[in-house]
Amino acid sequence: MEMTFNKNEIVKANETIQRNLGIEMLRMYLCFRIVLLHYYSSNNKYILNLKRNRFQVPCFFFISFYFLYPTISQRKYNKFKQRLERLLIPYIIHPIINWIINNIMFLIIKFNRYGRFLTLHELITQIIVGRGIYGIAALWFHFNLILFTIFFYISSYILKNYFLLFFQINAIISYKFQYSQINYRFFRQYTENIWMSVGNLIETFPITIFAFSFSSIKAKNIILKNHKKCLLFSFMLLYLIFNYNIFTNLRGFSSTGIQQIFISVFLFIFFSLIPFEILNNKVLLFIKQITKYTQGIYCLHFLFQYYLKLKFDKEGSFTGCILLYTISYLISLIGFKIFEKTKLKFLFN
């Protein structure tokens, strides 16, 4: 059956997608790499040096806070509130879904990832710190986003026009802790729940502030005016980073090293400048539908990957990763359609 779109949908797609499609495609690419990293983490010929360049989450942070800056700097309460809803709903409800499904699996067929019944205490721990003995470890990403969003919004009221300068200074100090590995040496002595929650906060802080700074000067407009030079330069730099060890390898948690900032910035530039506008309007709209459910895929793949791997694809494979991504996408699509008129839609898009 041929997919059809009405005229208004096509016009709307033409007006909005061409401005943001590059970033949406980047988010989809990053999400797929995360699924691949969790499901099929061996080095392979399909994705650039998967183990050596774990830049996916840092780049997500960069994108998120680049677009958050106007909300914070202009203190737009409604957008701030909507962002918290988009983050808190999946952050709280997805662990509950995981907890229920894993316990049902154990009660009915005596099989789940953990081989036992999960306790209420474990569920509460997951919700408080974004990770736990069980559940969605990937939700530490939401944990950081929520804390930073609240912290920055409150700070913008207290510090007014000086909040960005204040945090730029603190980002340098924070990065010093990261680059000198003081952060790693201090927090590694604690439990995984603590160092993944607090240690990652310190590591990702410089990335968020750099994204704010990049957004504050309206860098994207400057880049668009020099798009050919910026496209070529970003491609060359990314090639060097991915293929040569031009940065010192550091011990840390998941966002260690200044290379994460460089990769995030130049991936952002590169994808922003790819001329997707040459595509047909219907193709643009179709791509929008594919890239719409990144959050749902990010959260749901963690639930399904173990059952898929344990029962059907024990060694893990690239094909299995494609299947996992597709399953997570379809469930996100169906879930969004069911709950589209409620705030539960934020579980999926």
Image: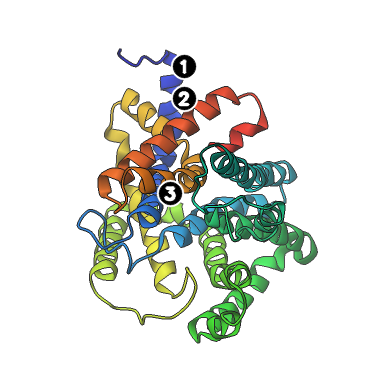
Within 10 Å of disc 1 (Cα), the crowding (few <14, some 14-19, many 20+) is few
Image coordinates for residue 180, horizontal then vertical, percent:
50, 87
Image coordinates for residue 221, horizontal then vertical, percent:
45, 51
Instruction: Report helix, strand or loop for mark 2.
Output: helix
Gap between marks 3 and 2 measured at Cα: 39 Å
Q: Nearer the viewer, residue 194 or 273?
A: 194
Instruction: Report helix, strand or loop for mark 1.
Output: helix
Image coordinates for residue 245, horizontal then vertical, percent:
28, 77
Q: Which residue is mark 2?
A: 12
Asked if residue 90 lies left or right of residue 276, the reply is right
Within 10 Å of disc 3 (Cα), the crowding (few <14, some 14-19, many 20+) is some
Asked if residue 228 lies left or right of residue 206, the reply is left
Residue drawn 29% across the image and 70% down it: 241
Q: Which residue is mark 3?
A: 306
Instruction: Report helix, strand or loop for mark 3.
Output: helix
Q: Are marks 2 and 1 in contact (CB under 8 Å)?
A: yes
